[in-house]
Image (spheres, rainbow, N blue to C red):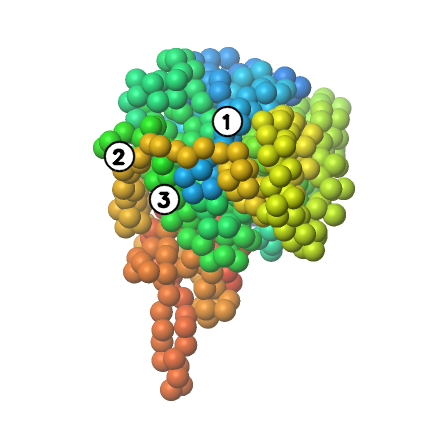
Amino acid sequence: MSALGNGDESTDAEAAEHYEAVVVGCGPGGAAAAATLADNGVETLVLERGVDAGAKNVSGGLLYAEESSPYTIDDLFPDFREEATERPVTDYHIHNVSGRQVKTFDITDLHEHDTAWSDAVLRRRMDSWLAERVHEKTSETGGGLLTEVRVNGLLWEDGEIVGVTCDEIDPIRADLVVAADGVNSELAREAGLMDWDDPEEWFQGVKAVVDVPPEEVNEGFDVGPDEGAAHLFSGDLFEGVRGGGFVYTNEDSLSIGTVFHLDSLAAERAEPHELLDALLTHPALGDWLPETYHEREYSAKLVPDSKKVAHESPHRDRLVLVGDAAGQMQAQGPIIKGMNHAVTAGALAAEAFVESRSRGATDGTGQLYARKLESEGVMAKLRPRSYDVASTVGENDLVTSLTDAVLDSPVGRFGVRVLGDRLEDLYSSPSLAAIIPDTRTPYVTLPTVIAEELGSEVDTENATIPPDLEERIGELTYDTDVGNPHIEVRDDSWDASGVAVTACPVSATDFGGGCYREETVQVNGHEERVVSLDTQPCVECGTCAVVADTDWEHPRGGKGVAFEEG
């Protein structure tokens, strides 16, 4: 690989070093793009801001390979499943909860719809393995992978995007820029393709990775050594916040987490760590968790709601967006798929560039990429037209209130009893999952009524005592960028930014530490309620950028949090 300069900010676009393609981020989308480019002889440079690929990445996480997809990750990396994943998911259930009453449905049929395979993954292990393969491939074409490099913006020339700028190295000029830099993509925002204006467009996920020996995983979930299970939870155990919980089996641990609509989380002033603890301590998990509870890691991230934000033309000039940066996260009821769509998008973007290059017209890459997303059926999965139609009626406040009232009435409860186990077939329907409204009804009201009318009382006990927030923060690995805060509060008043205290996964109203704190100060002879900020314990989820009045950017390369599990 040629030298990349010494970070001289005076270097202009013409003097910048040139690569055919630069890929920003080495998660599954970036890895797929880089591998496909390199396999077609394209000189490709990959820039990753973490100390290692995966150090900045968090997922639930299940990785799917869809039968209908033109690309799966094991197509691009043949040894992937044997080397980089945890357990194949062979059982899939959803639990409707009301107190200790639980009604469980087997929705394995939904999980297996259009599925070649699905594996549980931990991102640090998976992404670092992918990065090694990517570096090998890209090095053969004159590029390579650089870690601890933060791409801080786009390189412009005469009003057009021609490359990227970085904190640690000189600008890079490229014929193709692939933004695979995640849900907090600064490149997507600078290009005007994505924004953080509306909490309704996002979910927040919070997760604990819990130590469980392999034999206890096998026994607790009734699976073999090469099998795994996925369990979802909804109902009344999350303080009325729209969303739910999950438990996924890894080789020798469990990924246990919660995912909530960010607008609901903010409106209810619910605190993410407490909602996670409500799941961790529920009796339904009593048979799965060991007597000695040990959390390996606590983490969090934002998740785009593809139904609302998946960009139908995710490109501008030489820039294309893939994965979370383009809003390509499919969360439709029990259907939770993101990494597979990032892989497909990354490979399709690379394919579009290769085809355009062969015609001598790479400026058509973005348009061709968008057409491929449409023709290959990716956009139909991310933004189903049936949801657009159904949501017009189903997400009307009056309709929601009426529906909830009917469900909770004697008539509605009678209907639930009459349907009984036939509800399992409804939960297993892909077409119905695609039109589930983003209201309390499917997340809180209906599962609570189902549990009360059809459920059985859980007779196990759960003695789990989760760590407090201070312990969780203290166990994370940080390299604090002293003197370079990556978040600034524009308005520290409680009205403008107070919700950051409750919505931030490492802050709380009764906690003196964390990122955001509530304070009362004297101003001109009277008291005002304000927030203060300490970016040191930040997990870089970006929640506060959406719900509060802040300026938010990523820390410099290698700085900030480094997840060991992800």
Marks 2,3: beta carbons within 8 A: no
Looking at the image, the residue that sits furthest to the bottom is 525
Mark number displayed over residue 293: 2
Place of residue 58 in the rendered image (x, y in percent of width and height, measured from the top left) = 44, 36
Are there few (<14), some (14-19), or many (20+) residues within 10 Å of tag 3?
Answer: many
Q: CA distance from mark 1 to mark 3?
A: 20 Å
Choose the circle earlier in sequence order: 1 or 3: 1
| Front residue of this view, candidates 204 and 10 | 204
Which residue is labeled 3 in the image? 277
| Front residue of this view, candidates 476 and 111 | 111
Choose the circle earlier in sequence order: 2 or 3: 3
Place of residue 419 in the rendered image (x, y in percent of width and height, measured from the top left) = 63, 31
Which residue is labeled 1 in the image? 93
Choose the circle earlier in sequence order: 1 or 2: 1
Rendering quarter of residue 525: bottom left
Place of residue 113 in the rendered image (x, y in percent of width and height, measured from the top left) = 62, 21
Residue drawn at (65%, 48%) of the image: 406
Above or below for 166 versus 498: above
Residue type at numbered disc 3: Asp
Residue type at numbered disc 1: His
Residue drawn at (65%, 53%) of the image: 401
- Answer whether residue 433 is visible to the viewer in this image: yes
Residue drawn at (28%, 48%) of the image: 468
Q: Nearest to the eye among marks 1 and 2: give it.
A: 1
